[in-house]
Image (tube, rainbow, N blue to C red):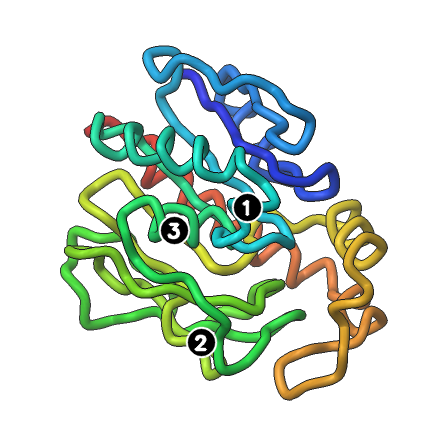
């Protein structure tokens, strides 16, 4: 099994996703799009992971590699690759499939709960009824055609979705660990403008070890689901 990730800025790496993959003996490689790295051959990828970033999927004029990336993601979806999109990554999946990505009614930055959709098809991944996760986004998206809505929050309806058996998009960050939190706060402190669903840097960094362990456990369940034999 080979996993490949697409990284958009230096401070948004895999976090504990890398730990999970390597613990399973999965080969991990990556493309730093911000540094001009070349995309891999799709034949060499079993699981594609698309990470987050502070840019918009609509910034193709300033970041032309976004158009190339979307075409690559579209091909991966067409070829039925396993795909996990995180925050911007979920938005890129939606955009690659022709859906709108646009500013949300509320920005969400910090630790807030999402509600699992308990009414969806039982074959899809099932989130808990309520779980607190890390958010860091100002945009949202229309669901791709045929997608199953997996989770919502008070500030944003489209928090997680699934396409088919092997494609999952998350608007939030289950990969968070303390080094990643420090990096987020340091690199994007300007985004922490007080609002209904925007916490202070202090609140974000004071998350408990128990909370981090809870989101790590949920990530493991998600990885089990994505990586199981199909």
Numbered label attached to residue 169: 3
Classify residue 209 by image quadrant: bottom right
Density class for disc 1 (Cα within 10 Å; few <14, some 14-19, many ≥20) is few
Label 1 secondary element: loop
**Is 123 on the left-hand or right-hand side of 67?**
left
Q: Which residue is mark 1?
A: 61
Q: Does residue 148 sit above or below 30 in this rendering?
A: below
Q: Which residue is mark 2?
A: 156
Q: Sequence-wise, which precedes: disc 1 or disc 2?
A: 1
Most distant residue in the bottom direction: 196
Q: Sequence-wise, which precedes: disc 1 or disc 3?
A: 1
Q: Nearer the viewer, residue 88 or 38?
A: 38
Estimate the x, y position of residue 78 in percent, counting from the top left: 21, 31
Label 3 secondary element: strand
Asked whether the residues under the numbered discs 1 and 2 touch, taking CB atoms below 8 Å apart as contact, a structural biologist would say no
Q: Does residue 59 sit above or below 172 in this rendering?
A: above
Q: Nearer the viewer, residue 67 or 167?
A: 67
Q: Sequence-wise, which precedes: disc 2 or disc 3?
A: 2
Classify residue 122 by image quadrant: bottom left
Camera-side mark, 1 or 3: 1
Asked whether the residues under the numbered discs 1 and 3 touch, taking CB atoms below 8 Å apart as contact, a structural biologist would say no
Compute the Cα span from label 1 to label 3: 25 Å
Estimate the x, y position of residue 88 in percent, counting from the top left: 51, 51
Residue at the image position 67 percent from the left and 43 percent from the top: 12
Density class for disc 3 (Cα within 10 Å; few <14, some 14-19, many ≥20) is many
């Amino acid at each position: 099994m080979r996993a490949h990730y697409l990284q958009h800025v230096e401070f948004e790496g895999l976090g504990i996703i890398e730990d999970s993959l390597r613990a399973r003996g999965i080969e991990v490689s990556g493309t730093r799009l911000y540094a001009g790295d070349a995309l891999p051959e799709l034949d060499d990828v079993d699981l594609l992971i698309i990470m987050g970033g502070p840019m918009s999927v609509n910034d193709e004029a300033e970041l032309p590699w976004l158009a190339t990336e979307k075409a690559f993601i579209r091909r991966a979806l067409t070829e039925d690759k396993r795909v996990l999109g995180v925050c911007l990554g979920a938005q890129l999946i939606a955009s690659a499939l022709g859906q709108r990505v646009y500013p949300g009614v509320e920005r969400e930055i910090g630790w807030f709960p999402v509600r699992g959709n308990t009414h969806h098809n039982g074959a899809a991944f099932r989130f808990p009824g309520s779980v607190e996760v890390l958010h860091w986004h100002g945009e949202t998206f229309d669901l791709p055609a045929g997608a199953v809505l997996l989770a919502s929050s008070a500030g944003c309806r489209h928090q997680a979705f699934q396409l088919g058996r092997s494609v999952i998009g998350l608007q939030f960050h289950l990969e968070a660990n303390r080094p990643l939190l420090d990096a987020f706060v340091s690199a994007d402190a300007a985004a922490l403008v007080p609002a209904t669903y925007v916490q202070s840097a202090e609140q974000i960094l004071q998350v408990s070890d128990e909370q981090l362990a809870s989101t790590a456990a949920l990530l493991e369940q998600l990885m089990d689901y994505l990586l199981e034999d199909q």
